[in-house]
Image: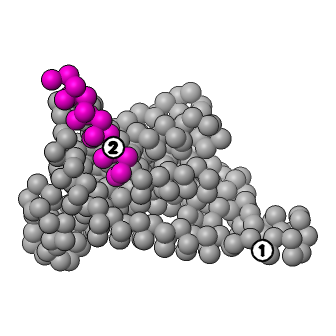
């Protein structure tokens, strides 16, 4: 019995690695560069400043940010397509065949880390803590997380209604889609748990990117949330991949807007104080401009 349980757990972990493989580029990408061109100052991208400092022609052999982003997006689409065609159904069968009591217990701990109802209040607490402690980074993590969760929720909900994909516990075939904006209860693509987890993970990893342990830890936890959805047979592997991408891009976009607004306010010697307004069934921001 012990040997059998160990074998089942071992096989499940192998399945996890198989699913996680397409996600690794996202985690690595998030630590090394943003999909959105980072600005060193408003209106002047970093690569232009570097070229001015290094001298004309020194950096011409490097790919521009737009070309890098295009290549990364193409690679992501390729990973998703290959997984959809070759791995979705085998991974689903594999994970369910080697599901064990131990993995069930692990998932019960991990799954709540992707619930918007838990992460939104937690982000609000982080904002309040940052204000009380006068910790700008902590405050920024909370604000970017709250904004990213709201953006991500809207994007994920729209995509779910657009695809109308059947969940694996409903259909054994991964290519069952009801089509855009039809009155359907099927909403598997993308995984909202995964997108929410990656939204918060990306917010944390972006603000604390200079710390060696925080980004890998944040993305590792988010990846476990995605794997838990496959384990529970409520999402396909490609649902998880799509959710990771939506969450990542939502956080990067909100962080970019935060930096842009903050820079312009600093240039004008103004300060914008923001605080989340959280209530049952709703969420938002209050803002005060000081000048």
Q: Residues within 10 Å of mark 2 (few under 14, many from 20)?
A: some
Magenta region includes residue 203: no
- Residue 254, visible in the rendered structure: no
Q: In x, y percent, where is residue 153?
A: 31, 57
| Mark 1–mark 2 distance (CA, rounded to whole Å) | 40 Å
Q: Are marks 1 and 2 in contact (CB under 8 Å)?
A: no
Q: Is residue 254 left or right of residue 85?
A: right
Q: Which residue is mark 2?
A: 14
User: Which mark's residue is nearer the viewer, 1 or 2?
Assistant: 2
Q: Is residue 103 left or right of residue 258?
A: left
- Is 147 drawn above or below residue 221 in the view shown? below
Q: Residue at x 18, y 39 (%)?
A: 99
Q: How is the image coloured?
A: one colour
Residue extent of the magenta highlight: 1-19
Magenta region includes residue 7: yes
Q: Residue at x 72, y 67 (%)?
A: 45
For this orientation, the residue located farthest to the right is 55
- Residue 60, visible in the rendered structure: yes
- Is 220 drawn above or below residue 173 in the view shown? above
Of the pair 162 and 109, the residue shown nearer to us: 109
Q: How many marks?
A: 2
Q: Secondary structure at mark 2?
A: helix
Q: Is residue 270 left or right of residue 56?
A: left
Q: Residue at x 47, y 52 (%)?
A: 24
Q: Residue at x 15, y 23 (%)?
A: 1
Secondary structure mostly seen in magenta is: helix
Of the pair 263 and 148, the residue shown nearer to us: 148
Q: Secondary structure at mark 1?
A: loop
For this orientation, the residue located farthest to the front is 3
Q: Which residue is mark 1?
A: 61
Task: Please tell me the numbered disc located at residue 98.
Answer: none
Query: Which of disc 2 and disc 1 is earlier in sequence?
Result: 2
């Amino acid at each position: 019995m012990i040997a059998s349980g160990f074998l089942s757990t071992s096989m499940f972990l192998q399945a996890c690695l198989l699913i996680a493989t397409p996600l690794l580029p996202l985690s690595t990408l998030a630590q090394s560069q943003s999909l959105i061109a980072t600005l060193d100052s408003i209106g002047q991208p970093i690569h232009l400043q570097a070229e001015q400092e290094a001298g004309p022609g020194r950096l011409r052999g490097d790919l521009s940010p737009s070309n890098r982003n295009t290549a990364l997006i193409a690679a992501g689409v390729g990973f998703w397509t290959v997984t959809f065609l070759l791995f979705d159904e085998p991974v689903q069968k594999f994970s369910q065949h080697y599901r064990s009591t131990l993995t069930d217990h692990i998932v019960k701990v991990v799954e709540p880390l992707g619930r918007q109802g838990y992460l939104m209040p937690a982000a609000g607490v982080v904002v309040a803590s940052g204000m009380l402690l006068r910790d700008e980074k902590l405050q920024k993590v909370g604000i970017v997380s709250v904004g990213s969760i709201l953006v991500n929720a809207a994007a994920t909900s729209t995509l779910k209604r657009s695809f109308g994909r059947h969940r694996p516990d409903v259909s054994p075939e991964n290519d069952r889609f009801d089509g855009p904006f039809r009155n359907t209860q099927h909403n598997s693509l993308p995984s909202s748990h995964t997108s929410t987890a990656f939204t918060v993970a990306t917010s944390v990893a972006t603000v604390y990117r200079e710390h060696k342990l925080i980004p890998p830890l944040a993305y590792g936890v988010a990846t476990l949330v995605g794997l838990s959805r496959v384990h529970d047979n409520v999402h396909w592997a490609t649902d998880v991949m799509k959710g990771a991408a939506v969450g990542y891009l939502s956080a990067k976009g909100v962080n970019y807007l935060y930096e842009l607004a903050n820079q312009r306010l600093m240039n004008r010697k103004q300060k914008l104080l923001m605080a989340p307004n959280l209530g049952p069934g709703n969420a938002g921001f209050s803002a005060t401009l000081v000048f």
